[in-house]
Image: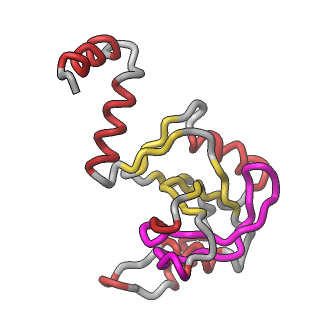
Amino acid sequence: FSVILADDLIDAAPGATAQMAAVYADKRCSILGVEDVLPSETASYGIVDAFNVSENLLQLKSIVEKPKPADAPSNLAVVGRYILTPKIFDCLEKVKPGKGGEIQLTDGISDLMQLEPIYAFRFKGKRFDCGSKLGFMKANVELALKHPEIANDFSDYLKAMKL
């Protein structure tokens, strides 16, 4: 099954989840969508330590939730796309709540790595961080300018604003 976090919008053809599903069809285990982030941004993401399997595919060695830049094992961030096997549910049942009483998916994934390989996949596409106001607005503007029904009118509107 797939988990798609709504604050990460990915403009891709084929879609990021479809790209990951193709990898799942081959590997038959959990796949995490990842991309490189700036070192200063690691504290906002789950960060993986992984080794290359092929061009866009890596196998996880570890995963840590929102590490400080100095503690991050890499700059490779999990960005809101997961294909997980049902074994994740058994792992999540055993996870103890962390900050704020929340059960972290990252902790469940870390436990799942003990049962099966987990892969990180660098999808092709552009990700927008819609969890921030600026990222949300960038997504709206860029996708509006690509939309066949409104692109011309929206472009004219932006030009008329004399930005």
State whether residue 100 is above or below residue 106. Answer: below
Colour convention: secondary structure
Looking at the image, residue 99 sits to the left or right of residue 31; the answer is left
Image position, residue 103 (x, y; %): 41, 78
Image position, residue 138 (x, y; %): 34, 39
Magenta span includes 87: no
Magenta span includes 51: yes
Image position, residue 89 (x, y; %): 54, 71
Residue at 29% in and 47% down: 134
Q: Quadrant of residue 52?
A: bottom right
Span colored in magenta = 42-70
Image position, residue 44 (x, y; %): 42, 67
Q: Main secondary structure of the magenta part?
A: strand
Can residue 126 be seen in this snapshot?
Answer: yes
Return the residue nearer the eye: 117 or 158. Answer: 158
State whether residue 77 is above or below residue 158. Answer: below
Residue at 70% in and 80% down: 114
Can residue 90 be seen in this snapshot?
Answer: no
Return the residue nearer the eye: 96 or 146. Answer: 146
Looking at the image, residue 126 sits to the left or right of residue 58; the answer is left
Looking at the image, residue 144 sits to the left or right of residue 57; the answer is left
